[in-house]
Amino acid sequence: MADTKTATLTFDNKSFELPMRSPTVGPDVVDIQKLYGQAGIFTHDPGFTSTSSCESGLTFIDGEEGILLHRGYSIEDLAMKASYLETCYLLLYGELPDKKQLPEFENRVTMHTMLHEQMTNFFRGFRRDAHPMAVMVGVVGAMSAFYHDSTDINDPWQREVASIRLIAKMPTIAAWAYKYSVGQPFVYPQNSLDYATNFLRMCFAVPAEEYQPDPILSKAMDRIFTLHADHEQNASTSTVRLAGSSGANPFACIAAGIACLWGPAHGGANQACLEMLREIGSVDRIPEFIKRAKDKDDPFRLMGFGHRVYKNFDPRAKVMKESADEVLDLLGIEDNPTLQVAKELERIALEDEYFVDKKLYPNVDFYSGIILDAMGFPTSMFTPIFAVSRTVGWIAQWKEMISDSSKIGRPRQLYTGPAHRDFVALDQR
Ligand code: CMC
């Protein structure tokens, strides 16, 4: 159905009719693309709290209801009933794969998991104590220097090859960043293993000893990947789109996304959250930290709580919580101080007036760290694992953008600096 609604903007005794557009689901949008040309004014929305930056058919979030859909399928269904690579296929190509398409896709990804051998030199160039995210930003950016046959963004085939390469190689890059940091030899991918098991093996096997993860751990790892696969126009995805809009190659764009994800308000929150739980240390210290979180003069925030879009339970957090219980049960971790603090913090925050009024619920990062910690990952690997998972979202959004629009992303500003000033020569200042 054609969009027929309009909105009227009135100022200085002039009125402007602005077209409105209706999405499949979600709030209508006012289309202001021609506003500056017609009315000579900009709109101002620094944190993009009310601004739609693109058209997308990939992911839908209803933050009030706590709903997350990929191509129409709920995240709960995908996390519980589909594998990560099935979800990748869905995000990339719009439909769930059939029985023939899935093994073909899995095979295509598996055949690209190795890295160019010369890339090992990149890892070795870093200090051993480098954060794995620093290594990932560098190594993924460097991929554009190795895979010249997949950097032409105008060639759909090259875009496709770059997409598969990134999804396939990201676990190898993250695992090798970890191996390098602990001084162990790199473990090469093994084609007979599924995506999640392969990643666990590359992280935890050593030449002296084989590693065979329990299928429950592989499933939990796969579910963590699925739960982070895409999340609409979040900061890192918008970064990838913006970088891509200039025509930059896909490896450079994804490196930009990784850099943005690193921040503690975004993907870095999973590391920050577990470190916070450890810093709190014991249940009796929770009130002190809750007090600090409420204090306007204290920059401290409860990490793993709150979300720009969700004003309800993050649906990913619900599934993650179930997974955490399964993994802790399997590993026989009944209660440790970190877990006790997490459970009590969750209980208090869900009842506390400040958190209830501001609708600050636990987000996905609150529970993922608990599982990853139990699996044996150091906190510095939490955000790299998020980056591995989100690569498909970044890539799918990037591909969608390239095929939809050729316009460079270029916001305007509300300038508050001095107006024109006459230059004053140095000897007169
Ligand atoms: N602890 C204490 N107070 C908080 C928190 C928190 N975690 N989050 C928000 N608030 C308060 C904030 O002080 C503000 O209060 P007031 O209205 O009185 O000024 C109000 O709630 C709204 O916060 P905001 O900063 O305007 O909200 P935002 O949408 O800009 O920020 C957020 C969202 C996720 C950055 C923020 O909630 C936060 O910093 N949370 C902690 C970090 C975190 O867990 N991030 C992971 C997000 S989920 C994974 C991902 O997307 O990467």
Image (spheres, grey):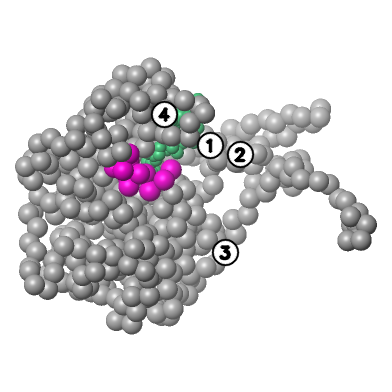
Q: Are marks 1 and 2 in contact (CB under 8 Å)?
A: yes
Tag 4 or tag 2, which sits nearer the N-term?
2
Start-end of magenta stretch: 264-276
> What residue would you read off at disc 1?
49
> What residue would you read off at disc 4?
293
List x then y, in percent, for residue 339.
19, 36
**Is 142 located above or below residue 409 in the figure?**
below
Question: How far apart are the alpha carbons under marks 1 and 3?
Answer: 24 Å
The answer to whether the residue bearing label 1 lies less than 8 angstroms from the nearest atom of ligand 1 is: yes
268 within the magenta span: yes
The answer to whether the residue bearing label 4 lies less than 8 angstroms from the nearest atom of ligand 1 is: yes
Tag 3 or tag 4, which sits nearer the N-term?
3
- Is disc 2 placed on a helix, strand or loop? loop
* Residue occupying the point 47% across, 75% down: 152
Tag 4 or tag 1, which sits nearer the N-term?
1
List x then y, in percent, for residue 96.
25, 53
Most foreground residue, 310 or 206: 206
Dot 4, crowdedness within 10 Å: few (<14), some or many (≥20)? some
For badge 2, the amino acid type reads Asp
Q: Nearer the viewer, mark 1 or mark 4?
A: 4
Q: Nearer the viewer, mark 2 or mark 4?
A: 4
For badge 1, the amino acid type reads Thr
Most foreground residue, 387 or 302: 302
- Dividing the image into four quarters, tell me where ligand 1 lies: top left
Residue extending furthest toward the bottom: 118
* Residue occupying the point 19% across, 31% down: 340
Question: How far apart are the alpha carbons under marks 4 and 3?
Answer: 40 Å
Tag on residue 246? 3
> What residue would you read off at disc 2?
45
For badge 3, the amino acid type reads Ser
